[in-house]
Image: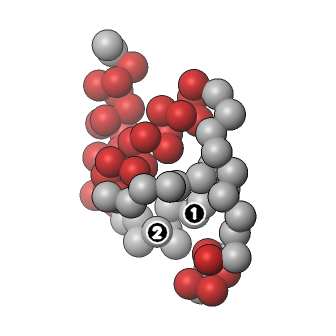
Amino acid sequence: LLDITQTDYISIPYVAPRNEIEQALVHAWEKVMEIEGIGIHDNFFALKGESIKALQVINLLRKDCLK
């Protein structure tokens, strides 16, 4: 597995979502992770993501897609 350090994460340039799918994913990540400014190249695990948060993201995406 990749070992991404905090320094590596900080050096990743922000890239905004480019389409509706990326926007939905970023929105779900930001809501679940309680972090603003997540870009499309950010790493879920570097942001302290874990299995419970992954399930919350999936659940939120399912709810948003059913609207």
Frontmost residue, 41 versus 35: 35
Q: At 52% across and 55% down in the image, what residue appears? A: 38
Quarter of image, res 33: bottom left
Residue type of the residue flagged with mark 2: Leu
Neighbour class for label 2 at 10 Å: few (<14), some, many (≥20)? some
Task: Evaluate if marks 2 and 1 touch, with contact meaning CB atoms under 8 Å apart.
Answer: yes
Q: Which type of secondary structure does the marked residue at label 1 adopt?
A: loop
Image coordinates for residue 50, horizontal then vertical, percent: 37, 65
Picture quadrant where residue 21 is located? top right
What residue is shown with label 2?
47
Please state the horizontal and vertical placement of residue 27, each as a whole percent of the image: 43, 40
The number of numbered badges drawn on the structure is 2
Does residue 55 show up?
A: no
Q: Is residue 51 above or below residue 63?
A: below
Residue at image mark 1: 43
Q: Is residue 64 visible?
A: yes
Decide if residue 42 is on the left or right side of residue 54. Answer: right
**Residue positioned 39% across, 60% down in the render:** 35
Q: What is the three-letter code of the residue carrying label 1?
A: Asn
